Image (spheres, grey):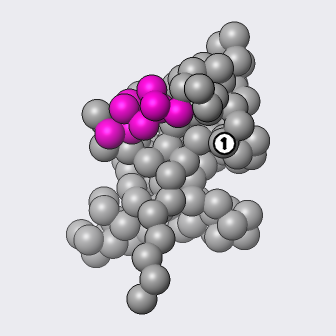
Amino acid sequence: MEKIRNYMAESLLSIGPTANILEATHIMHDNEVHSLLVEENGEYIGIITNHDISRKMVAEDLDPEKMLVAEVMSFPLLKLESQESMEKAAKIMRDHCVHHLAVTEHGQMLGILSITITTNI
């Protein structure tokens, strides 16, 4: 049984909920990641992804300098323990229509498990 720990990214980049979307996109671009954890008062409360931004911001032609991370992020943050199976992670992602899961070990944040779908054009 493949464990999610073997497939997660150990990057724990985060942003505050009162930051604007433009700042979030710059952090993602500069660090070559597709998501940021949203942290408030030392706790991870959600996640913002490229998908959230495109679905909620770009599609509605909203201003990324005026829109806050809290208004676009996905919450609550879906978490799974690092020793769980990839099958369980896939089921949770499928059931919740998400591409990212927070990975924890004994309740402590370890990383992010994400699926990226690419196509050859």
Residue 94, x across and y down, in percent: 32, 39
Identify which amino acid the numbered label 1 is placed on. Tyr
The reply to whether residue 45 is visible in this rendering is no
Specify whether residue 22 is painted magenta: no
Residue at the outermost top position: 106
* Number of numbered markers: 1
Which image quarter is the C terminus in?
bottom left
Q: Nearer the viewer, residue 54 or 120?
A: 120
Q: Check the image and report above or below for 99 versus 82.
A: below
Tell me what residue is drawn at x 31 percent, y 62 percent.
55
Tell me what residue is drawn at x 65 percent, y 13 percent.
107
Task: Choose top left, top right, bottom left or bottom right for residue 32.
Answer: bottom right
> Which residue is identified by label 1?
7
Tell me what residue is drawn at x 43 percent, y 76 percent.
119
Residue at the outermost left position: 60
Residue 14, x across and y down, in percent: 66, 44
**Left or right placement of residue 75 versus residue 115 in this view:** left
The reply to whether residue 82 is visible in this rendering is yes
Q: Main secondary structure of the magenta part?
A: helix
Residue 63, x across and y down, in percent: 38, 71
Q: Check the image and report above or below for 98 versus 59.
A: above
Q: Secondary structure at mark 1?
A: loop
Task: Choose top left, top right, bottom left or bottom right for residue 117.
Answer: bottom left
Q: Which residues, given as a range, are shown in magenta?
A: 86-94
